[in-house]
Amino acid sequence: MGTFELLSPKGLWLLSAIAPLLLLYVLKARRRRETVASTWLFQEARRDLVARHPFRRLLPETALILQLLAIVVLSLALARPSLRKDGLDGDVLAVVVDASASMGTSSGSARRIDLARAAARRAILGSRPGTRTFVVVDAGMPRLLGAPETVNERTLRGLDTLEPEDVEGNLQAALSLAKDRLRELPGKKTILVVTDGAVADPSLPSSPGVDVHVEVVGEARENTGVVRIATRAKRSPKPGTDTLEVFGVIRHFGRSPREVHVTVTLEGEEAPRASRRMLVEPGRDMPVVLTFDARADDHGKALYLQASPHDALAIDDIAYGLVPKGHAMPVALATDKSFSWFERALESDSDVALQKVAVSDLGHMNVDVDALVVVEGACPEKLGGHDALVVGPPEGRCFGVEVGHAVDVPKVTSWDPSDPRFRFASLDGARLSRATPLLFASPFGVLVRSDHGVLAVDAGDRDRSITLLGFDVGNTDWPLRASFVLFVRNVVELARTHRAQGAAGQLVTGGTLRLAVPPELDNPSKEAEIRLDGDPSFSRKASTRSGFLVVSPISRAGVYRVSFAGEAGKKVTRVASFTNATESDTSRKDMSVGGVPASPNAPAPEAHREWTGLFGLLGTLLVLADVLLLTKRKATPEKSGRRRVA
Amino acid sequence: MTGDAPGTDSSVPKPIPLLDPGVLAELEAMRRLFRPHARSAAAGAHLGRKRGGHAEFSEHRAYVAGDDLRRVDWSAFARGGAPVTKVFRAEEDVAVRLVVDTSASSAFGTPPKLEVAKRVAAAVAYLALAESERAEVSSARERLSVTAPPVRGRAGLSTVLRALDGLVASGGTRLADVVDDALLRYRRPGSLVVLSDFFDPGPWESALGRARAAGHDLSLVQVLADEEVSPPWDGDVMLVDSETGETVELTFDDDVREAYESRLRGLSSRLSHIATRLRGSYVRVVGAPHLPTIVRSLLTRKVETWAPSSS
């Protein structure tokens, strides 16, 4: 049933009016004394009245009773009587609001996020006065919306501006954050999760000492979204063009098939470069490949893969990509040799655009940011974000690897055949006349071992590969073997893969933007600015480090433009897409807490209900009744003239 | 003149004369109406009811052995051949006993009820004395108290008026005891005029019945003040009994007023029925009405209420 309590006990001060009222009544009760010849007939008359109207004898007390009742009732009204119900009740209330991409789904005339805001507001305002409340926003990375406070204005203001982000939610993480925060606070703890049920895992864990409630908002809707995008450039028979393949996966979350129109449009153009009409089956991934010829001036442009007509959730109806810079992989060969085996191997690859530079010019030449850099006989001071193959570095330190003294006639004892660089390539039978062993601390990344130590390592990181060969291939017979060419092509292919990831913009919202920068821009003192197409208010600043520009997290889908201070001509475009099947599935899952199903569409029960208004009305009615009773007047009879009475 | 009797106060200033010349003139005109029904068996100017030796021939009846031979009508015997005896109505003396309520309640009203009662009593006494009857004034409180011995004829008027003048209001009321005291004092029947408000819950009705059975002619004069007929109060009042000091708290409204007036009408009605039943007369006097009119109602044995005009 609930607990009756007074929210403002100080209001009972009005009860102190009872004493003066009784005193006044006692004084008032001293009636006017009138001497009469005899009270006999008056006593008889009173008895007659009482016999006819038994309750009449209460009349003198009725006004007092009404006044006393009015005082008591109005005192209670001032004391704000409240009935606390079970359910959403506690000394601390955490409201976890799902602000993931699916909350942008339209639900009638409102969006799910609008319904969620209203539900959160209702829960906060309906909590018992004195309850500390705070909001945790679930938008991929959970965050607090203000500190726990008893006065909710700031929290409510923050709630009013809450919008869905183009990311997948993580209710588990948000719930953990809420529990961590609650642990620090005393009293009864309650969590209300407000979500649309479009979650990866609808079963939320229960927690001892914390009441967890779930309110699901929004109606189930059918939705079609782009859940994957990839681009690839191929050699085109047309000179000066590449054939660009845009690969997309469409998934339809509905009951019956739906026809959609898929188009590819480049930035700055209205007419699509390619389009396809397709029938998407419910619950199946429907692949689509759209092909068009990309000219040289299309390189680096953003492209939009769209499925139309738009439906309940608009954000997943478009995915973003970039037009790669040609099918040929740029390779910069930095060597001072007049003859280079690597130059010969690279020139033989028709999918390589070779650029030869002097070693000393490496940091100053305009080298494609996605290029593979091959350096012979030197260790470049600055590499930027390039993939690199360093051959025969001098003694000393090179990319964290200590290059030792030269040894003669080392024997290759093993190599790593699982490494993509040695795919179909081997060093079996290769003879080396001279080599400089590498002192490499990590047990991982060793590519080639000899009887004199490690001869080849991968000194790179997750974003790029830096292959160090501790020997000049000219001091071996390896170049005469086919495996050398395969090795070179494998290294190029590895770089191509990295380039494809960066160029095609396979960044998904919620992830981190990592942008490889050329050596001349790799300067921590030079700040880069990141802006977002279509949102003039968006601006982030970041500095490069170790050849990369890192911006995290990216929570908005769209086309990002990166510009470097003082480098007006150097602008880089990157894209982030919202491609997430979990969020695109706008049907509702049955939520549960600790295995117990949560009621769908059940609004959060009110923590308390105040009865101030009712008591105030009752008190006012009692006052009115008293006034009516006391002001009741009847005409007194006039003294008559001489009359005869039988 | 007699000395001060109980109920008189010589220090009280003389009131306005109880009978002014105008009233006297009107009373003179009503002398012929004065026919008291009770008889005291003493000789007087009025024919008594009792059949007796003197005065007026009434009828013949057949002679029975033992009749006084002097009352045999020989002429009628000679004519009729059978002896007959004459029957006569004897002349008797009528005593008018005026019992005036002088309890504290009679001081109530404007003018005080006692003053009104005195004037009515004075008027009745005048008529009696003018007819050579006897008149006597007594005061009624808890017991009967004779204020002056009985007087006869016009010469006794001043005694009666002085006795009435000297009456003051104090003490309680026990009308039943007063009437019984009157019966003990007045062995011979007479005209008993009781002037009171009758605000007495005691058994005065049965006492009046006893008085009638003893042959007294009853005249009941209920004297009330205007305020007693129409209480002027409103709201919360505490009424204090002027005789007993008892209190009753009331919140005066229309219902209370109606209930009281109903009780008052009931008392008057009861007095009226008693008067009718006992072949007496009853008059209710409110305020200070025209005196001769009241006396006329008494003499003509009407049951009426008289109150003064508002002008």
Image: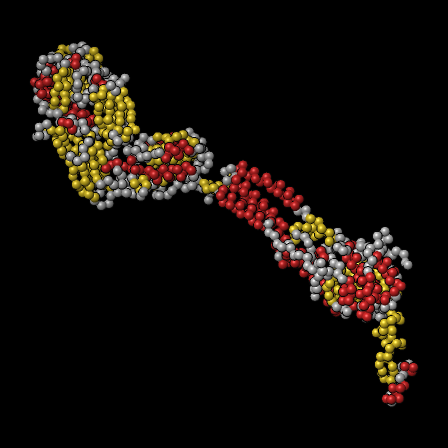
What residue appears at the point 77 percent right and 69 percent down from the top-left corner? B300
How are the colours assigned in the image? Answer: secondary structure
Q: Is residue B23 above or below residue A342?
A: below
Q: Where residue A397 sits: x, y (%)?
A: 22, 13
The quadrant of the picture occupied by the N terminus of chain B is bottom right
Q: Would you say A206 lies left or right of A507 here?
A: right
Q: Would you say A626 lies left or right of A324 here?
A: right
Q: Is residue A351 above or below residue A610?
A: above
Q: Is residue B218 above or below residue A271?
A: below
Check the image and name the residue furthest to the right. Answer: B70
Q: Where residue A416 sits: x, y (%)?
A: 17, 22
Q: Where residue A451 sits: x, y (%)?
A: 16, 14
Quarter holding residue A314? top left
Can residue A483 be seen in the rendering of this structure? Answer: no
Camera-side residue of A415 and A368? A368
Can residue A163 be seen in the rendering of this structure? Answer: yes
What residue appears at the point 85 percent right and 72 percent down from the top-left corner? B46
Camera-side residue of A372 and A264? A264
The quadrant of the picture occupied by the C terminus of chain B is bottom right
Q: Would you say A150 lies left or right of A261 here?
A: right
Q: In this view, does A531 lie above or below A95?
A: above
What residue appears at the point 14 percent right and 34 percent down from the top-left corner? A291
Camera-side residue of A321 and A638? A638
Camera-side residue of B238 and A182? B238
Q: Where residue B142 sits: x, y (%)?
A: 81, 57
What residue appears at the point 68 percent right and 57 percent down from the top-left corner? A639
Total marks in image: 0
Quarter holding residue A389? top left
Q: Would you say B270 lies left or right of A78 here?
A: right
